[in-house]
Image (spheres, rainbow, N blue to C red):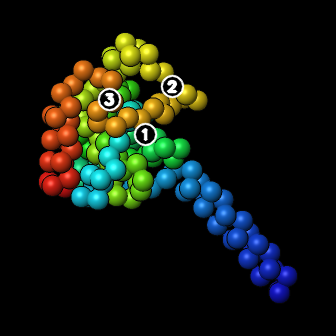
Amino acid sequence: MNSMSQRTKGILTFVGLVSLLIYSFYASAGPPNVKMLKNTKYTIGEVRYEYYNNKNGLGFDIEFYNNYDRIRAHRNGEFIFGRKYLVAYDSTNSKNGYIILDKYDITDSLSKYNIHEEGGYYKKSWSLEKIPFQYNKSDIEHDVKMAVINW
């Protein structure tokens, strides 16, 4: 009986470690908050999956990179499956939040600015001033601030 409980503990420990590894593979990111505005960077988020949630309607899984951490975000909104959008995030602490800017579909601009996937994902990031896409930077900054305030 004692050996059975040791075996069970071993299996549970193994399952726990595997779960922790899977969880750490997808870094967590919180909802946007004011702290995020101090260290905001911008990257490319890709709509990879769509899902249906009875309470909230149609939603999407959007993946992006925060430095070297892959983030999977679930959002409802006016997204198009397979398209890429500008994402604002806290570059020092992903728990301070991110915002997927559905107004800024950058899919068609990626090849124009010679931005390509690395290992199946877009890993580039920029400060506001260095965003290569032809959007008004003050509009982007305003939209991010409003999203933080209205969250």
Q: Residue at x 53, y 44 (%)?
A: 68
- Mark 1 near mark 3, Cβ–Cβ under 8 Å? no
Using the rendered image of the protein, determine whether residue 31 is visible from the camera's viewpoint. Answer: no
Q: Position of residue 108 (x, y in %)?
A: 33, 16
Of badges 1 and 3, the one in the foreground is 3
Q: Is residue 56 left or right of residue 7?
A: left
Q: Is residue 119 left or right of residue 86?
A: right
Of badges 2 and 1, the one in the foreground is 2
Callout 3 amino acid: Ile
Earlier in the chain: of badge 2 and badge 1, it is 1
Using the rendered image of the protein, determine whether residue 125 is visible from the camera's viewpoint. Answer: yes
Q: Position of residue 131 (x, y in %)?
A: 32, 29
Quadrant in the picture for residue 143: top left
Quadrant in the picture for residue 112: top left
Quadrant position of the N terminus in the picture: bottom right
Earlier in the chain: of badge 2 and badge 3, it is 2
Q: Is residue 39 above or below residue 46?
A: below
As drawn, the label of residue 63 is 1
Q: Residue at x 66, y 59 (%)?
A: 18
